[in-house]
Image (cartoon, rainbow, N blue to C red):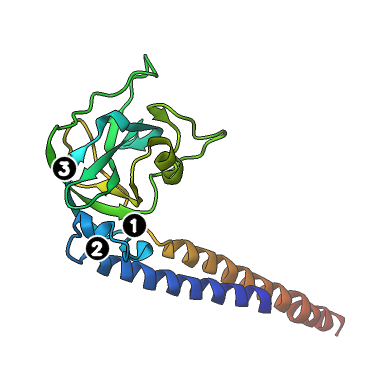
Amino acid sequence: MAATFSLGRWQLSRAAEKQALQTALAERQRLPALAGAALVAPAADGPALLHRAVALRGTWLPERTVYLDNRVMDRRTGFYVLTPLRLVDADAVVLVQRGWAPRNFEDRQALPSVATPAGEVRVEGRVAAQPSRAYALGADGAGAIRQNLDLDAFRAETGLPLAPLVVWQTGEPSEGLLRQWPAPDSGVEKHHGYAFQWFGLCALIALLVLWFQVARPLRRSSSHD
């Protein structure tokens, strides 16, 4: 009983920590949008930038576009489309997860039709640490279609001065892409669920102790009398 009760309290403390993190993320999202120069400044604190809103100006590098396979949006399977954006206000490139596009199931190597505007563009989004990842049995691989993409490996592969962060582009569907990204979730409900399970197990043990150590002996005693 003591062990399960302690584990339940520990899960509640973890939930309180995650709730504080969730509150901090919500406050961070309400801050003014960052420009590209602030995003890639040497003094920028990477973890403190996560989920911050950004407003970038730059030019796309469409020849380096990558399509992450087996991604689901609106209950359909397709690609997450990522294209590097060369910033106009900093000597750096930011990898942008631009949105989701459906795949051609008749030709699995066919790339979706995605419009990539030429010239300077403005991109609004939020900061993430890495491109979205999916479970993979082997290495990430190369080529336009991949299962996952590691930023450090992609930086070495392309030779681009990639920022150590990714931007998930937000906004209405455009350019053949959907952008229904999941909201940031710190996992508070998961810890509440675990706490409920531990407290439930504690209560079950208490009931069993009462039955076998108190109620049952009393019944036996009364029957002998």
Which secondary structure, mark 1?
loop
User: Which amino acid type is marked by label 2?
Assistant: Gln
Which circle marks residue 172 in the picture?
3
Residue 167 visible in the current orientation: yes
**How far apart, in angstroms, are the residues tagged by discs 2 and 1?**
10 Å
Left/right of residue 66 with respect to residue 176 in the rendered view: right
Q: Residue 162 or 111: which is nearer the viewer?
A: 162
Residue 149 visible in the current orientation: no
Left/right of residue 83 with respect to residue 132 in the rendered view: left
**How far apart, in angstroms, are the residues tagged by discs 2 and 3?**
18 Å
Left/right of residue 146 with respect to residue 117 in the rendered view: right
- Label 3 with label 1: CB-CB less than 8 Å: no
Which circle marks residue 184 in the picture?
1
Which quarter shows the N terminus? bottom right
Which secondary structure, mark 3?
loop
Residue annotated with mark 2: 29
Local crowd at mark 2 within 10 Å, few (<14), some, or many (≥20)? some
Quadrant of the rendered image containing residue 113: top left
User: Which amino acid type is marked by label 3?
Assistant: Glu
User: Which amino acid type is marked by label 1?
Assistant: Pro
- Label 2 with label 1: CB-CB less than 8 Å: yes
- Whole-percent x and y of residue 90? 22, 52
Height in image: 17 above or below 160? Answer: below
Residue at 26% in and 69% down: 27
